[in-house]
Amino acid sequence: MNLSFDLNDPHLIEDPYPIYSAFQQKRPVFFAQFGGERVLVVTKFDDVAVILNDRETRVNRPGTTVPEIFAGSASESLWENSISRMDPPVHTKVRRTAGNHFSQKNVSSFKVIVDEVTAEVFDEITTKKIEVVKSISNEIPMRVICRLLGIPIQDGRQLLNVTNSFLKIFLPINASRITAEEINAASRTFIDYFQKCVKSSSDRNRDDLISQLTFGPLQNGDISLAQLVGLLRGLFTAGYETTAAGISASFHAFASYQEQFQLLREDTSLIANAAEEILRWETPVQAILRYSAREVNLSDALVSPGQAVLLLTGASNRDPARYTNPQNIDIRREVGDHHAFGGGRHFCLGRSLAKLEMEAVFREMTERYSQFRQPSNLSRRQNLQFRSITYLPIELTGH
Ligand code: HEM
């Protein structure tokens, strides 16, 4: 096998796993171009864990914060105020503020909404043949995040129209002038919308996340308005995209591994573990970029300070040194601390919520259906970093 690595290669996007596996065996750490810079690509589970958990790694290239192409634009503000783009000490402060609202106690109170929305979406299915992404995967996280934030679903759908454009912000080096304009327009939409929400929540005392964050941290001066708007944008996009990817992957998984679905039907106490296993098997965020702030020893390389490191979590989650037969789904597997939710200080803030959503979907799947069949091919988003299914035909068999 030719061991070249091009993140835009359609073959790699189609099925990256044989390529990841070849790298793990032959060149577990190697240099490649990513977003216009030379990055050290890391594929093994233990090495990825070392960098993720190193408190000294950074998300911004040393000495930089905002890419030049966005200077002075709406995107500059959203870039600077995206929690996932922050380094300490700002990250520590914003994360603490947001974390209080995603504590276990708070998230448990989200369960009622998640269960209600999930049942509602499944109730709306009236045919045996469905396209899962449109009917289920996109609908549940969209309705859940809108209900939690306290925004109308129609507004959520409008914001979705600009989300794809906005997400191009995370590969700014590739952004041409035209793309930058598209990203700026999307950023402006998010800023205007969430500023309006914050303003209107000050007029009406409500119980949703926007009101809670406005009356709490914003009013107390713990975070600025720009940081709150950045956080709300982050919750909206992070809460939607990845969870939708996880739900689609679950339908595809259970149609491909029917015996695993039968096992789940027979023993629903496996639901929580099954969700983790599917996220390990088909990791929605396959690559995470970090900058090492000091010399770090990996199994096959020494990372020098300032080096950009691309962590292939899609590969590490299928590392045979960590998981036996990693290419297979085994919902009884002890899946442990997989990398689908990242790790270290940027560990996914919404993990418990995402798990609630996937578990609610699995409950509905096992209660309503006995089998899933995928009659024809699926389509995927042409992006290796954010891996998701965009079209998935499924035939449902009821009990
Ligand atoms: C299956 C669903 C999900 C997956 C696979 C997932 C995955 C991830 C990953 C890998 C990261 C770390 C990114 C990095 O280190 O650069 C992350 C961060 C984050 N996630 Fe999730 N996520 C999911 C659902 C959610 C939900 C439902 C929410 C909230 C509504 C959410 C909010 C966030 C936030 C705010 C961060 C940034 C945390 C920080 O930088 O401190 N995620 N997520």
Image (cartoon, rainbow, N blue to C red):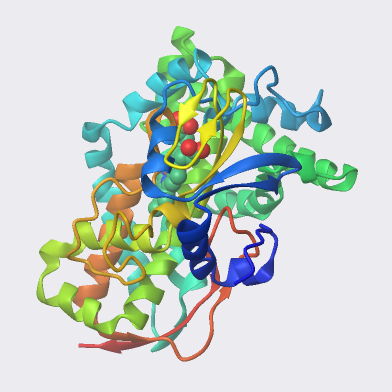
* Image position of 330 (left or right of 30): left
Which residue is located at x 27 percent, y 73 percent? 365
Can you say which quadrant of the picture contains the N terminus? bottom right
- Along the line of sight, which residue is nearer the eye, 211 or 382? 382
* Residue at far right of view: 177
Q: Quadrant of ligand 1?
A: top left
> Residue 200 in the image: x percent, y percent?
55, 28
Q: Is residue 88 above or below residue 310?
A: above
Q: Is residue 137 above or below residue 366?
A: above
> Residue 303 in the image: x percent, y percent?
54, 31
Q: Quadrant of residue 321?
A: bottom left
* Image position of 246 (left or right of 223): left
> Residue 319 in the image: x percent, y percent?
37, 57
- Residue 167 visible in this rendered orientation of the protein: yes
Which residue is located at x 44 percent, y 17 percent? 92
- Along the line of sight, which residue is nearer the eye, 387 or 108? 387
Q: Quadrant of residue 122?
A: bottom left
Q: Is residue 378 above or below residue 232?
A: below
The tally of labels here is 0
Which residue is located at x 82 percent, y 47 percent? 179
Can you say which quadrant of the picture contains the C terminus? bottom left
Q: Quadrant of residue 120?
A: bottom left
> Residue 33 in the image: x percent, y percent?
71, 47
Q: Is residue 69 above or below residue 387?
A: above
Which residue is located at x 36 percent, y 70 percent? 327
- Along the line of sight, which residue is nearer the eye, 257 or 7? 7
